[in-house]
Amino acid sequence: MEGFYGDSMPSRKQYYPVYQVGTDYIKNNMITEIDFATIHAYPDIWLSGEDENAQTVSTIIRKPLVFTEFGKSKKDPDYSPSVRDSYMNALYSDVYNLARNGGAFGGGMVWQILAEGMDSYDDGDEIVLSKDQSTRAIISQQSNKMASLEHNLIVHHG
């Protein structure tokens, strides 16, 4: 799910900005059979011009949370590779620190990694690892940091 509120929090009820259809993120993720929740975040598209720190979503569902899509669009007027890298570093740092300290986050997946020659799938958020070297390094570093957390859990609790 995209992470928008619905009827469970009327004062914060929102709709998916692109299609104007609503979901109730909290109510839907409270279903017993749901094992973990996901969120997506595209602040430069959904809430252009607003401070990203003011866009933070907090929940009360008490389940693991995976940040399954985030990115910075090349279509945004303020885009540059360094802006994207800074955004990703900040987000990955938060995800890692929350996971390391026992928080709900279990990881984050950027949208979208493409191979060379997949230009027809470009949507503005694409990352081609062979071309976007600085972003590739950030993704690799985060992967190693998150993997070390899993290793530490196995070593200390295994």
Image (cartoon, rainbow, N blue to C red):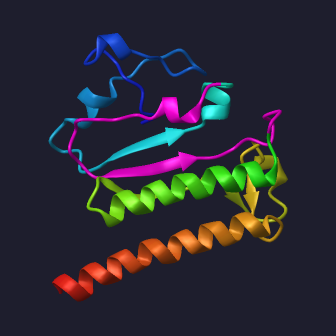
- Left/right placement of residue 61 relative to residue 130 reads left
Q: Is residue 151 magenta?
A: no
Residue 23: x %, y % from top left: 38, 22
Residue 131: x %, y % from top left: 83, 67
Residue at x-position 60% and y-position 73%: 140
Residue 45: x %, y % from top left: 67, 30
Residue 112 visible here: no
Q: Which residues are magenta?
A: 50-78
Q: Is residue 76 magenta?
A: yes
- Left/right placement of residue 37 relative to residue 123 reads left
Give the quarter of the image for residue 57.
top left
Give the quarter of the image for residue 37.
top left
Location of the C terminus (image quadrant): bottom left
- Left/right placement of residue 60 relative to residue 45 reads left
Q: Nearer the viewer, residue 51 or 46?
A: 51
Residue at x-position 34% and y-position 35%: 58
108 shown above or below 74: below
Residue at x-position 26% and y-position 36%: 29
Q: Nearer the viewer, residue 149 or 15?
A: 149
Residue 154: x %, y % from top left: 25, 84
102 shown above or below 51: below
Give the quarter of the image for residue 157.
bottom left
Residue 134 visible here: yes
The majority secondary structure of the magenta stretch comes to loop
84 shown above or below 14: below
